[in-house]
Amino acid sequence: MAQWACIMTWVAILQSILTVGGMVAIFATLKFTADQARAAERAIESAENTSKIELRAYLAIVPAGFGFDGNAQQAIIYVRHENSGQTLGKKVRFAGIVKYLQHPIPEDYPFPNIEAGKSITVIHPRQTFEVPVVYDGALTGDEIIRNKKQRWRFFVFAKLLYEDIFGVPHETTACWSVDISSFHVRKPGMKHDVTYEYAEIHNDAD
């Protein structure tokens, strides 16, 4: 009887070991499955994010010309909006201002507090359109002389607010100077080709 009891004791011990081992194996399997599921979710999320990045709209602001209103003696800076993305940009809002400043502007020069207007349009892929931004002041002879000496220039500050097709908001800002040293006031009206120079600040896009 004592021998039989000893045998049963060892059998019970072996059963316990097998039970524990089985539970460990099941836990390891469940953990592996959960890890695989999380990895698959991350891969799907990454693929979705990559697809959104590849498919979303990318709106840029670029120089489009310089004009002069001979009657009002005002400078007009033409700004072009471009969509280089694969899908449209919606709820597009624009704000722009022209300032007459010494060139170059300091690195800590703040972006002007300009409010974008109401949504006016959507911009489809490869679509462009132009907006005139008028200098709020008369273009005097002294300003022309200062500009020709390249100490003062017109600076355009512009921003675009829009949403991509996924409903994510974006903002593009741009700043460049306009050198009108070769411009002749005697030829007002149509747009003129002048030299542009992007500033080292306030040219960003997300």
Image: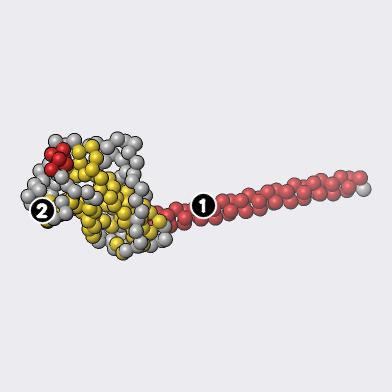
> Residue at left 10%, top 53%?
188
Q: Position of residue 173 (x, y in %)?
A: 32, 49
**Drawn side of residue 4 relative to residue 15, left or right:** right
Closer to the camera, 112 or 88?
112
How many marks the image carries: the answer is: 2
Residue at image x 58%, y 51%?
32
| Residue 145 placement (x, y as % from top left) | 13, 39
Q: Position of residue 192 (x, y in %)?
A: 12, 51
Image coords of residue 74 (percent x, y): 18, 51
Q: What residue sits right under mark 2 in the picture?
A: 188
Q: Kindly identify the amino acid type of the residue bearing the numbered disc 1.
A: Ala
Q: Is residue 183 above or below residue 92?
A: above
Q: Quadrant of residue 153?
A: top left
At a point 61% along the width and 51% down the height, the residue shown is: 31
Alpha carbon separation for disc pair 2 and 1: 64 Å
Q: Does residue 129 appear left or right of residue 25 in this picture?
A: left
Which label sits in the foreground, 2 or 1? 2
Using the rendered image of the protein, determine whether residue 136 is visible from the camera's viewpoint.
yes
Q: What kind of colouring is applied to the model shown?
A: secondary structure
Q: Nearer the viewer, residue 4 or 150?
A: 150
- Comes first in the chain, label 2 or label 1: 1
